[in-house]
Image: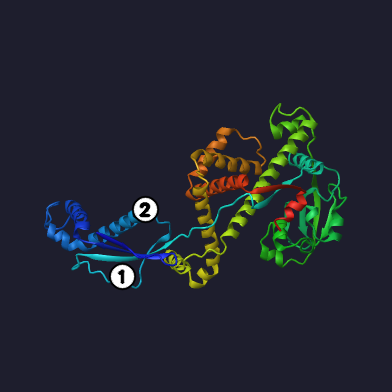
Amino acid sequence: MQINHSEIKDLTSVITLTLGPADYEEAVNKQIRQIRQKADIPGFRKGMVPAGLIRKMYGKSVLADVLNNKIAEELNKYIEEQKLHVLGEPLPNEEQNQKVDLEFDSTFTFVFDIALAPELDTKMTAKNKITYYRVKVTDEMVSKQVSNYADRYGSYLDADDVQENDIVRGVIREDKEEGITKEDAVIYPRYIKDAKIKKKFIGLKKEGNVTFNPMKAFESETEVASLLGIDKDTAKQLTTDFTFTVTSISRHQPAAIDGELFAKIYGENNVKDEADFRQRVRQEIQDNMDQDSEYKFGLDVREALMKKVEKAELPQEFLRRWVKTNNEKMTDEEIDKNFPQMILELKWQLVKDQLMKQLDIKVEKEDVDAYAKKVARMQFMQYGLMHVEDQYLDNFAQEMLKKDDQLRGIVERVAEEKIYAAEKKIMKVEEKEVSQEDFNKLFA
């Protein structure tokens, strides 16, 4: 076997691979023997079919299979030995490859184009300045979150008259013969768009009536269809008025700021009093804000790194070919539209790969497990489950990591966070305290 590698020019080069009988005959003969042992051909006992017949019947396909495997093996081996940082995968050279005759040829030459990653200038120093924005947690933010908790753990009580934020249940009937009737209709006055109709509901008591046109009261036929229990097409045709008779009024009552609420949020006997509760809420908000600060810092570090490499050239012609080869259903127009973003993402991946080596950063299993557990905790918190036991978090996280796409995503996030943490120690970081409003403006 011979391998020739042409001079690298504009980050592309050509690898020529020549295979002779000594490189493939043993593997071909082995596969022929295996087929012969299993072949079931009329007129021959199993395992006794002549090898020549097997070779005549299957020889070409076996040789093609062996050559394909050998090519892939030798190319990968050569790339690893030469420590070539290849972009994408080797592609057959469209000009130099000759037609292969599997029946008569004994020596085969294959030519491949490869693209190489450039060396990028990713080194940061203390001369590189970056701002770390820290959000100041105010008493107003704490009070708002306390109110949110009180609302979340509140309850609905019967009320005597309708107010805007109540839930009103009743019977609704169309004002015509054999019209639409729904016994268990539910109306939320706050969602009524027509001010005059909304005013009719405010102050109603049980058994009180109000007549209105649903299509004037609400934003869309979807809302009307849901209210009346009909389809949207029928709702579109409605022009008549309906009479709504109130059967019950429910009003949300926030939970009291007391020990029962403290226990629901932070567990039994973990909060002493309201002052302690508010301090815990403050710390919780600060922790969340700090995560947002880290996220913003990561975005700014990435922007600074990408700015350093914005003029770096990649072998775009090869990469466009590679994208087309691996996405046959994509049209040229789709490739043109998405290609600039692909190049940016590829550059970012190259920056990360280079920094991982420069900064000696490694992603260990315990890092991935810890991050998956953090993601699991955040997902449970979105549903109001603030204190899920570790064993459930661990189980949820491990199930998450069984999915390849989620595992890859988490590994990428861990690597990025480690890069940002390392750069934080290298660059000159100026911390700046800002309000939540000003912090949010940074993302505009």
Task: Find residue 312 and report its horizontal and vertical position in percent.
Answer: 53, 63
Q: Amino acid at mark 1?
A: Asn
Q: Amino acid at mark 2?
A: Glu
- Total marks shown come to 2
**Would you say 215 lies left or right of 295 here?**
right
Q: Which residue is mark 2?
A: 80
**Would you say 220 lies left or right of 380 here?**
right
Residue at image location 65% in from the left, 47% down from the top: 294
Residue at image location 67% in from the left, 63% down from the top: 232
Q: In this orientation, which residue lies closer to the viewer: 334 or 362?
A: 362
Quadrant of the frame with the C terminus: bottom right
Q: Which residue is mark 1?
A: 97
Which marked residue is nearer to the observer: mark 1 or mark 2?
2
Name the secondary structure under disc 1. loop
- Contact between marks 1 and 2 (CB within 8 A): the answer is no
Q: Residues within 10 Å of mark 1 (few under 14, many from 20)?
A: few
Above-or-below relation of 16 to 162? below
- Residue 170 visible within the image: no
Quarter location, residue 306: bottom right
Name the secondary structure under disc 2. helix
Task: Find residue 343 and report its horizontal and vertical position in percent.
Answer: 52, 63
Quadrant of the frame with the N terminus: bottom left
